[in-house]
Image (tube, grey):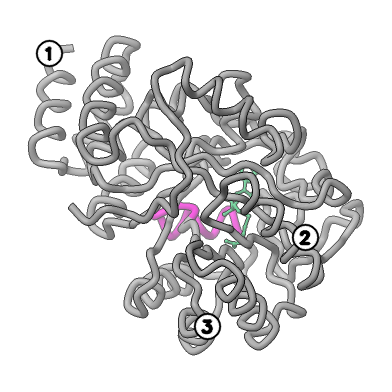
Amino acid sequence: MTDILSLIEKLEKEHSLTLGEYQFLIDNRTPEAAKILAEKADKIRREIYGNAVFIRGLIEVSNICKNDCLYCGIRRSNRNCDRYRLTKAEILECCDEGYGLGFRTFVMQGGEDAYFSDSVLCDIVRAIKERYPDCAVTLSMGEKSEESYQKLFDAGADRYLLRHETADSEHYAMLHPEEMSFETRMNCLKALRKIGFQTGCGFMVGSPYQTTAMLAKDLKFIEEFKPDMCGIGPFIPHKDTPFADKAGGSAELTCYLLSIIRLIHPPVLLPSTTALGTIDENGREKGIMAGANVVMPNLSPKSVRKKYELYNNKLSDGDESAQCKESLNERIKKIGYEIVTDRGDVKNG
Ligand code: SAH
């Protein structure tokens, strides 16, 4: 415990630990250490963002994907996936509804669907920005060339989320088919940053074959890359994937890592993810109390929500839906925070 306490203090002061120290912090965690980390994470978050929780309207634009990531329910090999894609008009309707509900960031996320070419996607981004110049547009549409990312940025997209999935190249190869590469993923993140996007990385907690040494590498990567956003959530198996029988990640470790990430890079925008809310009924609240300051309710049309099934039992209605924002806000107020109507850009500290 003494060792752990001095490491936590070092992390709070220096925002940096060695790989070995990160691993020690994870391997030797206790409920007491988690509590101390969460308190420190909460304090530093309040100094930067107060008690604000930012909301993003998540529009799942397509579950058609050319990739075959072994963990993902919408991988191309899954024949049981009922495929869909939204039209521009449908996406704009989602934004109209979201704007009325108080959303000032729209996140378009989807599989790598060739239909959403640069010109199609740029046209949609421009239309949203024209209609709602006071809103931020975030894209989470996978790997593209630097030229494509540049076009999307020039069309007005503000942010891009691309989880690195794991900072260990051998682990990356165990989670992805041969044609996907760790280098490409990391190069995409670098290109996004260089172009000027607010850039988000992230990883799954408890993904198959993950060790605490690998998690230490994820934390080191975050320390060095200093992402503007970082999405982490537990791995949850999907029945129609090669990882159907693998164990899932825990809410406990996810929250512990959220606190550490907040202390590594205090201004980071850190979502309390849907996956965390899915494995624990109070997951969203636990994530926020551990240091998260973003929630991303589902703004997709009701008819397609169940089809964007990245993992089994993924939450998409109830307080996970944008329409239930008020009920979500009540829950968030109960734990001492408040949903705000704001773009919620990263503060560069
Ligand atoms: N095609 C986009 C969006 C991917 S879906 C892209 O490549 O960025 C968004 C995230 O969901 C993924 O990055 C992955 O980390 C997460 N995800 C996928 N399958 C999952 C599973 N079974 N359990 C938990 N998270 C999962």
Q: Secondary structure at mark 3?
A: loop
**Circle 1: element type:** helix
Instruction: State yes or no: discs 1 and 2 in contact (Cβ < 8 Å).
Output: no
Q: Which residue is mark 1?
A: 2
Q: Residue at x 88, y 49 (%)?
A: 303
Q: Residues within 10 Å of mark 3 (few under 14, many from 20)?
A: some
Question: Residue 200's spot in the image, x, y percent?
Answer: 42, 58
- Amino acid on which the number 3 mark rests in the picture: Ala
Q: For the residue with label 2, is its CB less than 8 Å from the closest atom of ligand 1?
A: no
Image height of 97 relative to 338, above or below: below
Q: Earlier in the sequence, mark 1 or mark 2?
A: 1
Find disc 2 in the rendering and name its residue. Answer: 63
Q: Separation of disc 3 and disc 2 at Cα?
A: 23 Å
Amino acid found under the numbered disc labelled 1: Thr
Ranked by sequence position, the earlier of labels 3 and 1 is: 1
Percent of width and height locating residue 196: 34, 75
User: How busy is the neighbourhood of tag 1: few (under 14 within 10 Å), some, or many (20 plus)?
Assistant: few
In the figure, is residue 138 to the left or right of 315? left
